[in-house]
Image (cartoon, helix red, strand yellow):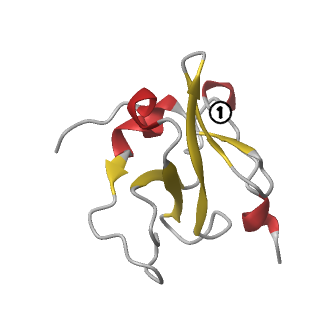
């Protein structure tokens, strides 16, 4: 699979697949927006909160072409998809080594 760098898709529609691997980190979600790449930072600009959703560099390798875009499908007609994985942090992990993201859709009860 060919690696895609975020700067090559700026301005394109994109789906963010937030994947709660174990089902105990707030839930999974699919968010949509426009890919942006500025000052070596990759983020997705959205019309809903969070308006600027940062994509950590550790997730860049998951950036891929949506091979089967269809209306009504999970990623709808977004030509690109990036995956963010949620899971509990190991007990011996230093939280300062990670970027914290606010994902309001996962905070809803």
Instruction: Please state if 86 lies on the left or on the right of 75 as rendered.
Output: right
Residue at 61% in and 25% down: 97
- Is 78 above or below relative to 108? above
- Is 105 above or below relative to 72? above
Which of these two is toward me, 13 or 86? 13
Residue at 46% in and 69% down: 75
- Check the image and name the residue furthest to the front: 11
Q: Quadrant of residue 42?
A: top right
- Check the image and name the residue furthest to the top: 39
Q: Position of residue 93 (x, y in %)?
A: 58, 34
Which residue matches tag 1? Answer: 99
Count how many numbered circles sit on residues in the image: 1
Q: Position of residue 54 (x, y in %)?
A: 64, 38
Where the C terminus falls, by quadrant? bottom right
Which of these two is toward me, 86 or 76? 76
Where the N terminus falls, by quadrant? top left
């Amino acid at each position: 699979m060919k690696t895609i760098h975020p700067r090559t898709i700026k301005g394109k529609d994109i789906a963010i697949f937030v994947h709660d691997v174990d089902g105990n980190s707030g839930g999974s979600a699919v968010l949509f927006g426009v890919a942006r790449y500025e000052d070596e930072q990759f983020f997705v600009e959205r019309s809903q909160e969070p308006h600027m959703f940062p994509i950590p560099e550790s997730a860049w390798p998951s950036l891929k072409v949506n091979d089967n875009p269809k209306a009504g499908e999970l990623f709808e007609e977004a030509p690109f998809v990036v995956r963010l994985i949620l899971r509990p942090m190991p007990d011996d992990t230093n939280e300062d080594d990670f970027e914290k993201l606010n994902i309001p859709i996962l905070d809803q009860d």
